[in-house]
Amino acid sequence: MNIIKHSLVVLGMIAAPAFAAGQVSISIDAGKPGPVINKNVYGQFAENLGTGVYEGMWVGPKSNIPNTRGWRNDVVGALKELHVPLVRWPGG
């Protein structure tokens, strides 16, 4: 008898959300401007994979590769062309 009682309780708990769900609707007005998102929320993450950062983006200030304070000028220029607002390295 207890097995049947427990089975019915479990079955009721599983089925309850299906009966409790209400109707949901959403309306989007493309003519109204939405909230402004800070440009620094989205950016790029530079990860140390192979030579992606060291000898890739970062060459050090004494390198023969053209750089500004150790960062390769061509990489910084490419990031500016892509309008990358923020680069996180190492991770944040």
Image: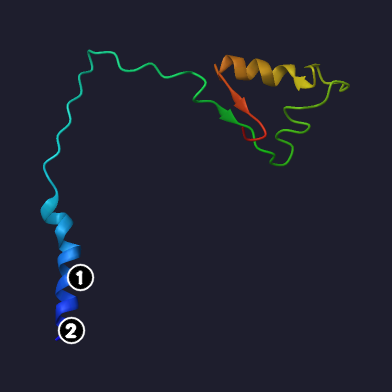
Using the image, determine if residue 50 lies above or below residue 29: below
Report the mark closest to the observer, 1 or 2.
Answer: 2
Q: Is residue 77 left or right of residue 58?
A: left
Residue holding disc 2: 2
Using the image, determine if residue 92 lies above or below residue 74: below
State the image coordinates of residue 29 (x, y, percent, origin top left): 20, 19
State the image coordinates of residue 82 (x, y, percent, origin top left): 55, 18
The residue depicted at 49 percent of the width and 24 percent of the height is 41
The part of the image, by quadrant, that contains residue 54 is top right
Using the image, determine if residue 37 lies above or below residue 50: above
Q: Nearer the viewer, residue 57 or 90?
A: 90
Q: Quadrant of the C terminus?
A: top right
Numbered circle sitting on residue 10: 1
Q: Nearer the viewer, residue 13 or 24?
A: 13
The residue depicted at 67 percent of the width and 34 percent of the height is 90
Q: Is residue 27 left or right of residue 72?
A: left
Using the image, determine if residue 58 lies above or below residue 21: above
Q: Secondary structure at mark 1?
A: helix
Q: What amino acid type is highlighted by mark number 1?
A: Val
Disc 1 to disc 2, C-alpha distance = 12 Å
State the image coordinates of residue 1 (x, y, percent, origin top left): 14, 86
Q: Determine the residue located farthest toward the bottom in the rendered image.
A: 1
Q: What amino acid type is highlighted by mark number 2?
A: Asn
